Every structure is written in structure tokens, then in C-alpha cells.
Amino acid sequence: MPDIDVNKCKGHLDTALRRLKRMCDKLGVARRWREIEHHEKRTAKKRRQMAAAVKRQQKKNSMEQIPRKKRR
């Protein structure tokens, strides 16, 4: 678990809290907590990841097909 020394933040609690939140986001603490809280089967996880990959590929293909306007 990340920890922040409030004294190094010049005693400002708001600054220390912001630094703690930023550190937790970088480490993925919230994402990991949600994974632990709600178990997802491997097949469901694979299915979700595959659907996301298909959606990304379709978006990429549609962006390549759109002709762009020429600037004057």
C-alpha cells in the first residue's frame, strides 16, 4: 500500500491527499481492488478482452476508410 509523508508535503493535507490518489492510480490499486471484490471467470475475461479487441480493430478500419478533406 502506498504511503505519503505529510511533513514532506509542507503540512498541507490536501496536497498529501492528491499525491496519495495519484500514486494509487499509477499503481492500479483501485482496479486491483475491483478485481478482488468481484471474481470474473477466465472465459468471461477472455470474451470481454476479445470483444474490446474486435471493437478497436473495427474502429481502426473505419478510420482508414474515411477520406479526409484537403486543406487549402
Image: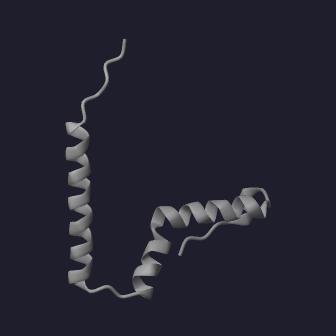
Decide if residue 22 is on the left or right side of residue 53: right
Horizontal and vertical percent position of residue 7: 75, 62
Look at the picture and state if 54 lies above or below 38: above
Q: Which residue, as the protein is rendered here, is positioned at the far right?
A: 11
Horizontal and vertical percent position of residue 5: 68, 66
Judge by depth and name the residue closer to the eye, 1 or 30.
30
Decide if residue 49 is on the left or right side of residue 17: left
Q: Residue at x 50, y 73 (%)?
A: 30
Horizontal and vertical percent position of residue 68: 29, 28
Instruction: Identify the image's colour scheme: rainbow, by chain, secondary structure or one colour.
Output: one colour
Which image quarter: residue 32? Answer: bottom left
Q: Residue at x 26, y 77 (%)?
A: 45
Identify the image quadrant of the C terminus: top left
Q: Which residue, as the protein is rendered here, is positioned at the far top?
A: 72
Look at the picture and state if 55 lies above or below 43: above
Q: Residue at x 22, y 61 (%)?
A: 53
Look at the picture and state if 22 lies above or below 59: below
Horizontal and vertical percent position of residue 61: 19, 45
Which image quarter: residue 35? Answer: bottom left
Judge by depth and name the residue closer to the eye, 33 or 3.
33
Decide if residue 70 is on the left or right side of residue 42: right
Look at the picture and state if 45 lies above or below 16: below
Judge by depth and name the residue closer to the eye, 65 or 5.
65
